[in-house]
Image (cartoon, rainbow, N blue to C red):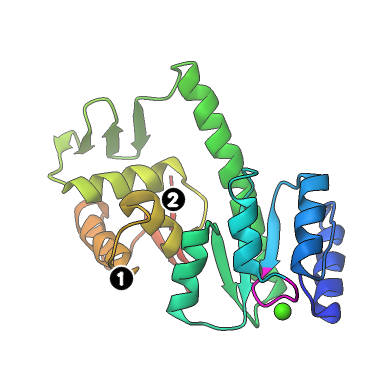
Amino acid sequence: VEDEPTLLETLEYNLTHRGYQVCTAADGPTALEVARQEQPNLIVLDVMLPGLDGFEVCRVLRPEMNVPILMLTARDEEVDKVVGLEVGADDYMTKPFSMRELLARIKALLRRVRLDREEMAAESKEARPEQLTFGNLMLDLTRCEVLRDGEPLHLKPKEYELLVFLARNRGIVLSRDLILERVWGWDYGGGSRTVDVHVRWLREKIEPDPGQPTRIITVRGVGYRFEG
Ligand code: CA
């Protein structure tokens, strides 16, 4: 959903080229109509739109359908991000952005949704793995314990939750906002610096060399990725 014809065309071209089926809208009301009709797997939504802005579209659609929404904003203001997260956006990109990064984020979001569904399916079958092992690191999810070389690590509750979230989504780039939302919750008042601080603490406990992390990788400008 984008009201700038050139950008809309570029997005459509690139996404179609990558094998996605694309439906477009250039204003808020049309976006609602198309979304309800087509039931998309993912929505890329511009914030500044005629008729109804992206936040409003997001607010209306959120309770109607369980679809990941990636918002595009021209303004890099924290307040916009907060509003966007409150209305239920899943990820954010500030214009101008590279098509390559957008495609990567779309892929990550779709993959996350698929993993969530698989996780839910696994949970319902009670087949969820109870232990995750990465080299000398073992996460015992039943006992809420992390072992390094067989020795239990003393992790704070949030460090543990963060590590489990990263490990379950290993190989996927996770934005700070997403990590904040999933580990700390919507109502958490602190900023995304909290994520950085906890990552630093975790690295000191789980990385062979915290100065040269090989498990929790920083993805510049986006967030983190856990290497299994
Ligand atoms: Ca716009």
- Residue 157's label in the rendered image is none
Residue at the spot 59% in from the left edge and 50% down from the top edge? 62
Task: Examine the rendered structure and indicate whether residue 5 appears above or below residue 63.
Answer: below
Q: Residues within 10 Å of mark 2 (few under 14, many from 20)?
A: some
Mark 2 CB near ligand 1 (8 Å cut): no
Q: Residues within 10 Å of mark 1 (few under 14, many from 20)?
A: few
Asked if residue 47 lies in the magenta stretch, the reply is yes
Find the magenta span and give its range: 46-51
Q: Amino acid at mark 2?
A: Glu
Q: Secondary structure at mark 2?
A: loop
- Residue 227's label in the rendered image is 2
- Secondary structure mostly seen in the magenta stretch: loop
Let me know if residue 84 appears in the view: yes
Task: Examine the rendered structure and indicate whether residue 216 appears above or below residue 14.
Answer: above
Residue at the spot 24% in from the left edge and 55% down from the top edge? 202
Q: Tag 2 or tag 1, which sits nearer the N-term? A: 1
Query: Could you say which is closer to the camera, residue 135 or residue 166?
Result: 166
Asked if residue 167 lies in the magenta stretch, the reply is no
- Residue 210: x percent and y percent? 25, 63
Query: Which residue is situated farthest in the top direction here?
Result: 125
- Residue 193's label in the rendered image is 1
Residue at the spot 71% in from the left edge and 72% down from the top edge? 99
- Residue 127: x percent and y percent? 45, 18
Residue at the spot 31% in from the left edge and 50% down from the top edge? 162
Task: Examine the rendered structure and indicate whether residue 4 appears above or below residue 208.
Answer: below
Which quarter of the rendered picture does the C terminus lie within? top left
Let me know if residue 71 appears in the view: no
